[in-house]
Amino acid sequence: MKIIIKTKNLDLTKDLQSFIEKKIGSVKKFIDVLKREDEIGKTLAEVFVEVEKETEHHKKGKVFCVKTQVILPGKSLMVGFEADDLFKAVVGAKDELKMEIEKYKFKNVDKRRRLLRKAKQEIDI
Protein backbone atom coordinates (compact mmCIF):
# COMPACT_ATOMS: atom_id res chain seq x y z
CA MET A 1 0.00 0.00 0.00
CA LYS A 2 1.39 3.36 -1.03
CA ILE A 3 0.57 6.48 0.98
CA ILE A 4 0.98 9.78 -0.87
CA ILE A 5 0.69 12.89 1.33
CA LYS A 6 -0.06 16.39 0.04
CA THR A 7 -0.40 19.51 2.20
CA LYS A 8 -2.03 22.85 1.60
CA ASN A 9 -1.35 26.00 3.67
CA LEU A 10 0.92 24.15 6.11
CA ASP A 11 4.33 22.54 6.22
CA LEU A 12 4.80 18.78 6.14
CA THR A 13 7.17 18.07 9.00
CA LYS A 14 8.69 14.67 9.67
CA ASP A 15 6.57 14.30 12.81
CA LEU A 16 3.37 15.04 10.91
CA GLN A 17 4.36 12.72 8.06
CA SER A 18 5.16 9.84 10.42
CA PHE A 19 1.90 10.40 12.34
CA ILE A 20 -0.15 10.32 9.12
CA GLU A 21 1.67 7.24 7.82
CA LYS A 22 1.16 5.48 11.16
CA LYS A 23 -2.56 6.27 11.43
CA ILE A 24 -3.53 5.82 7.77
CA GLY A 25 -1.16 2.84 7.50
CA SER A 26 -3.19 1.04 10.15
CA VAL A 27 -5.96 0.69 7.56
CA LYS A 28 -3.65 -1.60 5.59
CA LYS A 29 -4.76 -4.65 7.56
CA PHE A 30 -8.31 -4.18 6.24
CA ILE A 31 -7.10 -3.80 2.66
CA ASP A 32 -4.76 -6.82 2.79
CA VAL A 33 -7.72 -9.07 3.55
CA LEU A 34 -9.01 -8.24 0.08
CA LYS A 35 -5.91 -9.67 -1.64
CA ARG A 36 -6.33 -12.67 -3.86
CA GLU A 37 -3.80 -15.39 -4.40
CA ASP A 38 -3.01 -14.21 -7.94
CA GLU A 39 -2.10 -10.71 -6.70
CA ILE A 40 0.72 -11.68 -4.32
CA GLY A 41 3.51 -9.14 -4.41
CA LYS A 42 1.44 -6.43 -6.12
CA THR A 43 0.43 -3.13 -4.56
CA LEU A 44 -3.29 -3.51 -4.05
CA ALA A 45 -4.16 0.04 -3.03
CA GLU A 46 -2.91 3.58 -3.29
CA VAL A 47 -3.91 6.08 -0.64
CA PHE A 48 -3.85 9.80 -1.36
CA VAL A 49 -4.00 11.99 1.74
CA GLU A 50 -4.54 15.74 1.46
CA VAL A 51 -4.08 17.72 4.67
CA GLU A 52 -5.04 21.35 4.57
CA LYS A 53 -5.59 24.36 6.73
CA GLU A 54 -8.63 25.92 5.13
CA THR A 55 -7.85 29.56 5.93
CA GLU A 56 -4.90 31.50 7.22
CA HIS A 57 -6.86 34.02 9.31
CA HIS A 58 -9.26 31.78 11.28
CA LYS A 59 -8.12 30.47 14.64
CA LYS A 60 -11.31 28.81 15.94
CA GLY A 61 -13.72 26.28 14.55
CA LYS A 62 -13.12 23.49 12.09
CA VAL A 63 -9.97 24.86 10.52
CA PHE A 64 -8.19 21.63 9.48
CA CYS A 65 -9.45 19.32 6.77
CA VAL A 66 -8.13 15.88 5.84
CA LYS A 67 -9.27 14.25 2.61
CA THR A 68 -8.30 10.69 1.77
CA GLN A 69 -8.83 8.75 -1.41
CA VAL A 70 -8.19 5.02 -1.67
CA ILE A 71 -8.04 3.42 -5.08
CA LEU A 72 -9.03 -0.23 -4.88
CA PRO A 73 -9.71 -2.69 -7.69
CA GLY A 74 -13.03 -1.64 -9.19
CA LYS A 75 -13.71 1.18 -6.74
CA SER A 76 -12.37 4.49 -5.53
CA LEU A 77 -13.26 5.47 -1.96
CA MET A 78 -13.19 9.14 -0.94
CA VAL A 79 -13.44 10.40 2.65
CA GLY A 80 -13.17 13.86 4.12
CA PHE A 81 -13.07 14.97 7.75
CA GLU A 82 -12.87 18.41 9.36
CA ALA A 83 -11.79 19.25 12.91
CA ASP A 84 -10.35 22.02 15.04
CA ASP A 85 -7.13 20.07 15.65
CA LEU A 86 -4.92 18.60 12.93
CA PHE A 87 -4.33 15.30 14.71
CA LYS A 88 -8.04 14.87 15.48
CA ALA A 89 -8.78 15.40 11.79
CA VAL A 90 -6.29 12.68 10.77
CA VAL A 91 -7.72 10.20 13.30
CA GLY A 92 -11.29 11.03 12.24
CA ALA A 93 -10.42 10.52 8.57
CA LYS A 94 -8.84 7.16 9.44
CA ASP A 95 -11.99 6.03 11.24
CA GLU A 96 -14.22 7.10 8.33
CA LEU A 97 -11.90 5.37 5.86
CA LYS A 98 -11.98 2.18 7.91
CA MET A 99 -15.79 2.14 7.81
CA GLU A 100 -15.83 2.70 4.03
CA ILE A 101 -13.33 -0.12 3.42
CA GLU A 102 -15.34 -2.48 5.61
CA LYS A 103 -18.50 -1.66 3.62
CA TYR A 104 -16.62 -2.31 0.36
CA LYS A 105 -15.23 -5.58 1.72
CA PHE A 106 -18.64 -6.74 2.94
CA LYS A 107 -20.22 -6.03 -0.45
CA ASN A 108 -17.54 -8.08 -2.24
CA VAL A 109 -17.83 -11.01 0.17
CA ASP A 110 -21.62 -10.93 0.01
CA LYS A 111 -21.55 -10.85 -3.80
CA ARG A 112 -19.27 -13.89 -3.88
CA ARG A 113 -21.51 -15.75 -1.42
CA ARG A 114 -24.62 -15.02 -3.48
CA LEU A 115 -22.95 -16.41 -6.60
CA LEU A 116 -21.86 -19.56 -4.77
CA ARG A 117 -25.31 -20.03 -3.26
CA LYS A 118 -26.91 -19.69 -6.70
CA ALA A 119 -24.47 -22.19 -8.22
CA LYS A 120 -25.16 -24.67 -5.40
CA GLN A 121 -28.91 -24.36 -5.95
CA GLU A 122 -28.47 -25.04 -9.65
CA ILE A 123 -26.41 -28.15 -8.90
CA ASP A 124 -28.99 -29.45 -6.40
CA ILE A 125 -31.81 -29.12 -8.93
Image (cartoon, grey):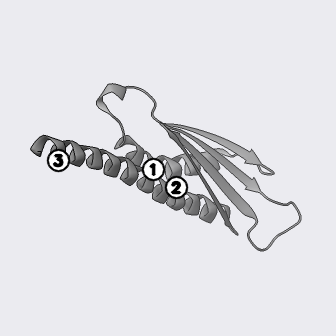
Nearer the observer: mark 1 or 3; the answer is 3
For the residues bearing labels 1 and 2, Cβ distance under 8 angstroms? yes
In the image shown, does 88 or 111 lie closer to the viewer? 111
The answer to whether residue 25 of the structure is visible from this angle is yes
Where in the figure is residue 60, as x and y percent of width and height?
79, 74
Instruction: Please tell me which residue is depicted at 34% across the width and 44% down the height of the picture.
Output: 33
| Numbered disc 1: secondary structure | loop
Image quadrant in which the C terminus is located: top left
Where in the figure is residue 102, as x and y percent of width and height?
41, 55
Pointer 3: what residue?
A: 121
Nearer the observer: mark 3 or 2; the answer is 3
Q: Tell me: residue 56, above or below residue 125.
A: below
The answer to whether residue 40 of the structure is visible from this angle is no
Instruction: Please tell me which residue is depicted at 53% across the width and 60% down the height of the picture.
Output: 96
Cα separation between marks 3 and 2: 36 Å
Q: Earlier in the sequence, mark 1 or mark 3?
A: 1
Side (left or right) of 98 relative to 111: right
| Numbered disc 3: secondary structure | helix
In the image shown, does 106 or 111 lie closer to the viewer? 111
Nearer the observer: mark 1 or 2; the answer is 2
